[in-house]
Image (tube, rainbow, N blue to C red):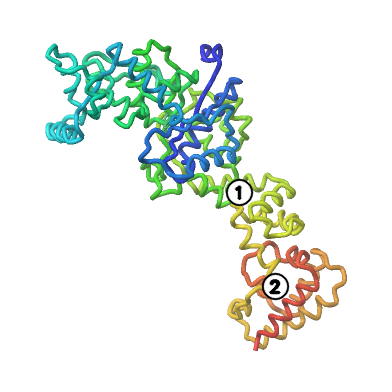
């Protein structure tokens, strides 16, 4: 780690704009890149990897960048876009042709399918069979490949992987990793549409953008030997590599849309807080040295180290995230919660009302989205279901009588505060000989239409005397 300290730390997140929004797995990778850069007074870069033109999703890039900002993972540089650097990659691919580390391949898609099928039949991993490499190396090669290309034949450029030996590297999380070269495919570097593949572009860009630490998900681990071969072919120094564990569903399968919502935008819409999402993600795969569960980003920046990152895939559990979100809601002061709710609910509720109910809500909600259902009765008259209004063991005559007493008594109450509303409520209970739960639930349903609300007496105070009485009277009129 000492070595890392001496160099200028530059990390990056390199999302492909091929999905609806920012994937939660990508948010996790971005977070670690961000934290590591900040810890080392370095820079965090965003690079849009949009070279796979067939998979581009309209608007994806904008949504990814917005979501990163919302999470607070604002890059220091970028966005750089690979599609704007197309010519550059070609130049580097040609350099590899010239120094023998790459070769032209003119194989047709049909031939490649046949090769793949054959390999599969023989129980071998489906790899390119090196047909064009052999032609290139053969003294009988009839035509210079670049001329064939110019003559209009479609070609790709492939990496010339040595047949023997091993490619090794040190991973900051996994230690020494080795791959046998004979199992590494002669990867396509430049496609027939002139665009680079991920492998060429990622190496060229990580080098040119002076990325010191390539921190990415484990799914890229098997691509890394190809990248190392490329760094070596260009005679470029290697960056540090760290492959983070892949997040999993509670059933241990790879995090997928079918089992869990995977887009950060979903969590945002549901009223999860970015601080809670970041904190929860930090607890996956990394343990705080003091075993803390709840800690701010600043603490993670201070304490993060790769040696505390787990190799095995941590479970992304929405239930735990929701619990943590509830904790974050409770940690906010009333002003903060009111502000959050005000903008979350698009100013639908008066800010003053939100401030009044925020301490009531804090105890009841785990996500901002749960607030509206609990407080909408403050701004709209309820629909009261008589079956819910009248307690199970009472008939409508009894309910009418008691509700009438409730109205009369509350009409006479001048000091409309939670405490006196509560006191008077207790007196009415005694007088009516109803159980407290029967009486208070009837009042709750009459004023809100619901059986679950913020605490009743506070709610009545907030609603105001006139409106409370008005709603009680409406309920009374509805009982035949
Ligand atoms: N474009 C890759 C992705 O979508 C980036 C992989 C890497 O970080 O090298 O995740």
Mark 1, residue position? 326
Q: Residue at x 29, y 26 (%)?
A: 188
Across and down, in percent, residue 308 comes to 49, 26
Q: Residue at x 41, y 45 (%)?
A: 250
Q: Residue at x 48, y 21 (%)?
A: 213
* Res. 150 image quadrant: top left
Image quarter hosting the C terminus: bottom right
When the figure is inspected, residue 76 is found, relative to residue 69, above or below; the finding is: above
Q: Splitting the image into four quadrants, where does ligand 1 fall?
A: top left
When the figure is inspected, residue 269 is found, relative to residue 429, above or below; the finding is: above
Q: Residues within 10 Å of mark 2 (few under 14, many from 20)?
A: many
Front position in the image: 378 or 305? 378
In the rendered view, does 180 fall on the left or right side of 459?
Answer: left
* Res. 385 image quadrant: bottom right
Across and down, in percent, residue 295 comes to 61, 35
Residue 153's mark? Answer: none
* Res. 75 image quadrant: top right
In the rendered view, does 87 fall on the left or right side of 383?
Answer: left
Q: How many marks on residues?
A: 2
Q: Is residue 437 visible?
A: no
Q: Residue at x 73, y 50 (%)?
A: 334
Across and down, in percent, residue 51 comes to 39, 33
Among numbered discs 2 and 1, the one appearing first in the sequence: 1
């Amino acid at each position: 780690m000492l070595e890392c300290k001496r160099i200028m730390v530059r990390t990056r997140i390199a999302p492909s704009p091929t999905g609806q929004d920012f994937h939660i797995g990508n948010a996790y990778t971005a977070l670690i890149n961000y934290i590591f850069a900040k810890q080392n007074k370095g820079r965090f870069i965003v690079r849009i990897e949009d070279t796979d033109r067939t998979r581009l999703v309209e608007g994806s890039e904008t949504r990814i960048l917005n979501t990163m900002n919302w999470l607070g993972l604002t890059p220091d540089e970028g966005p750089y876009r690979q599609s704007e650097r197309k010519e550059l990659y070609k130049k580097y691919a040609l350099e590899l042709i010239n120094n023998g580390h790459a070769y032209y391949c003119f194989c047709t898609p049909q031939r490649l399918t046949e090769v793949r099928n054959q390999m599969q039949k023989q129980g071998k991993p489906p790899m390119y069979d090196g047909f064009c490499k052999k032609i290139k190396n053969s003294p009988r090669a009839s035509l210079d490949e670049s001329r064939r290309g110019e003559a209009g034949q479609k070609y790709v450029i492939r990496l010339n992987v040595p047949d023997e030996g091993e490619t090794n590297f040190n991973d900051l999380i996994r230690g020494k990793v080795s791959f046998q070269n004979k199992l590494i495919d002669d990867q396509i570097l430049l496609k027939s549409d002139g665009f680079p593949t991920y492998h060429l572009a990622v190496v060229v860009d990580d080098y040119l953008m002076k990325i010191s630490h390539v921190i990415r998900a484990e799914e890229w681990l098997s691509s890394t030997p190809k990248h190392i071969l490329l760094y070596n072919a260009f005679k470029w120094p290697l960056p540090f590599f760290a492959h983070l564990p892949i997040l999993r569903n509670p059933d241990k399968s790879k995090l997928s849309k079918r089992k869990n919502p995977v887009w950060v935008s979903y969590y945002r819409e549901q009223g999860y807080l970015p601080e809670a999402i970041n904190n929860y993600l930090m607890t996956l795969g990394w343990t705080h040295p003091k075993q803390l569960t709840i800690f701010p980003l600043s603490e993670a920046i201070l304490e993060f180290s790769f040696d505390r990152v787990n190799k095995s895939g941590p479970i992304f559990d929405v239930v735990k995230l929701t619990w943590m979100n509830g904790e974050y809601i409770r940690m906010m002061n009333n002003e903060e919660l009111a502000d959050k709710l005000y903008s979350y609910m698009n100013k639908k509720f008066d800010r003053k009302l939100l401030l009044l109910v925020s301490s009531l809500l804090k105890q009841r909600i785990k996500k901002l989205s749960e607030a509206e259902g609990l407080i909408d009765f403050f701004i709209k008259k309820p629909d009261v279901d008589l079956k819910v209004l009248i307690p199970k063991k009472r008939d409508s005559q009894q309910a009418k009588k008691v509700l009438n007493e409730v109205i009369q008594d509350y009409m006479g109450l001048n000091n409309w505060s939670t405490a006196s509303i509560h006191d008077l409520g207790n007196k009415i209970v005694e007088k009516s000989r109803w159980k407290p739960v029967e009486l208070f639930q009837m009042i709750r349903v009459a004023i809100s239409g619901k059986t679950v609300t913020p605490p009743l007496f506070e709610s009545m105070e907030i609603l105001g005397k006139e409106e409370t009485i008005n709603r009680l009277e409406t309920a009374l009129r509805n009982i035949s």
